[in-house]
Amino acid sequence: MKFFIFFFPLLLFAQPKTTPKAIDERLKKSNFLLVDGKTDDMIALNQSVLKDAKSINYAKGRLYAYYNLALAFSMQYKYSKSNYYLKLMEPELKYMDDGSQEIAMNVVYSMNYRGIKMYDEALKKLKKNLIPADNIKNDSARYSLKGILLTQITRNYIEKKNYDSATYYGKSVIQEFKRAKKMDIGLNTNLKIVTLLLGEAKINQNKTDSAEFYVKSAQSVPIKLGNNEFAAFKLLGQIHDARKQYDSAIVDYKKAIELAAKIKNFRKLAELYGLISTVYEKTGQTDNQKKYELKYNALNDSLKTVDENNLKDTVGVLVEEKQKPLEDKNNLLLYIILAGIAGTAVIVFFVYKRIKNNDKVLNVKEQETQKLNQQLNVAFEEVIQLAKKNDPEFLARFQEVYPELFPKLLKIEPQLMNTELKFCALLFLNFSTKDIAAYTFVQPQSIQTRKNRLRKRLNITSDEDIYIWMKNL
């Protein structure tokens, strides 16, 4: 006890103080966690940083912590939480002298749009920020942000399956970095990522040699991506698969699966399950093929649920964003009206009359829209209930509500039977494998088999989501 009483004051003085410098050091550590794909650790660290930055009113610390949290949650497909921190970040931007953080914030918004397959909105957001990025005075920040923007544009074009555009923007990153006087950790990381993306574009174009060239180029970049190295192993697996070197492909895919699982990149994990399942099928290893096919289907169904939950929030953010310029226009209109009132009574009269006419038009359009929405909702709900009851009337009623789907399907495969058309209708209505099995009184395994057969008949590739394919049709 005497020992404790004597040394207790010394222990108090020995406690680390919360200072801006100490917070900056912890933020640097966050960057390394990001590269290693340790997003859970990154979130915990930045939540702690945010708490300490608030306690000493350190604006820069708050700003960077908000950004890091938004980025980490976006990488975990938790777009609602990501958007929450981006909203908290926006007011903090006024404390910064340059626009680099605003650009970085918009990049994360674009990632959230891409996550729910709103590729065009993501591309608009990214391309809009290319000019502000060019105006950044700091060379290192300018090259870094331009590289990130162009890399994200490349990624969006790959997911849109526009591989020529992806190649153009990917090569633009490499050209941009050639102008940099010194390649730091951030630039090398970005260079490796975009080089792997170029490899992905080429493998999807069946240009195996070009894909291998980019993989080797990425491996020569002096930086390690930690668990994110799964991307290189995935590409190597696809190259070996294309060359019918199936044993090597399986080894690569298993390594990629191990790394992707560690960073909880479930989208790529699902893709990898599908790829390795296909290789096992080619080699006649039926048990392994079914094992990974089941994993693929289970994970894919889970991701659909996640996407549905994320869609509403992210679309809400987009609507808010679209409303901002409208609000600015409304404010401008108000100033014009006030100026008119101050100027002459005649201008007031015409402005008032115009507003009244606009209101009438808007009311009529709103009433028409509400009426149409009510009719659509009633029809949709009726079709859903008929499907759940497995009612014989379902097929006929579905054709009345959605008259264009079946003709388009029959154009692709004229020999489709009514039972197959009914199955397509259930997929179009977004019923899961489990739901279809329950409503049609068959086993989920049989439903999955029917999905696979339908893919072959309609030429739907294994890496394409059959639900999205139906909607896009």
Image (cartoon, grey):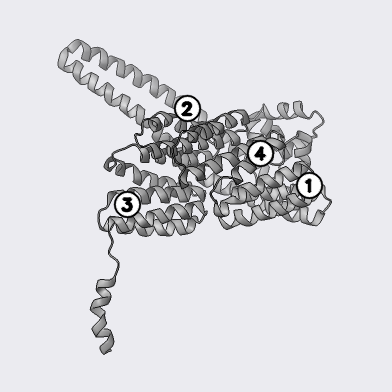
Is disc 3 surrounded by few (<14), some (14 to 19) or many (20+) residues within 10 Å? many
Which residue was labeled with disc 4? 213
Q: Amino acid at mark 3?
A: Gly
Between the C-alphas of marks 2 and 1, the distance is: 57 Å
Which residue was labeled with disc 2? 369
Residue 211 image point, x, y percent: 67, 38
Give the number of the disc on residue 245. Answer: 1
Between the C-alphas of marks 4 and 3, the distance is: 41 Å
Of mark 2 and mark 1, the one earlier in the sequence is 1
Between the C-alphas of marks 1 and 4, the distance is: 18 Å
Answer yes or no: is residue 252 visible. Answer: yes
Per the image, label 4 sits on a secondary structure element best described as: helix
Answer yes or no: is residue 376 visible. Answer: no
Residue 285 image point, x, y percent: 82, 54
Which residue was labeled with disc 3? 61
Task: Between residue 80 and residue 374, name the one nearer to us.
Answer: 80
Tell me if label 2 and label 1 are in contact, CB under 8 Å: no
Farthest residue toward the bottom?
2
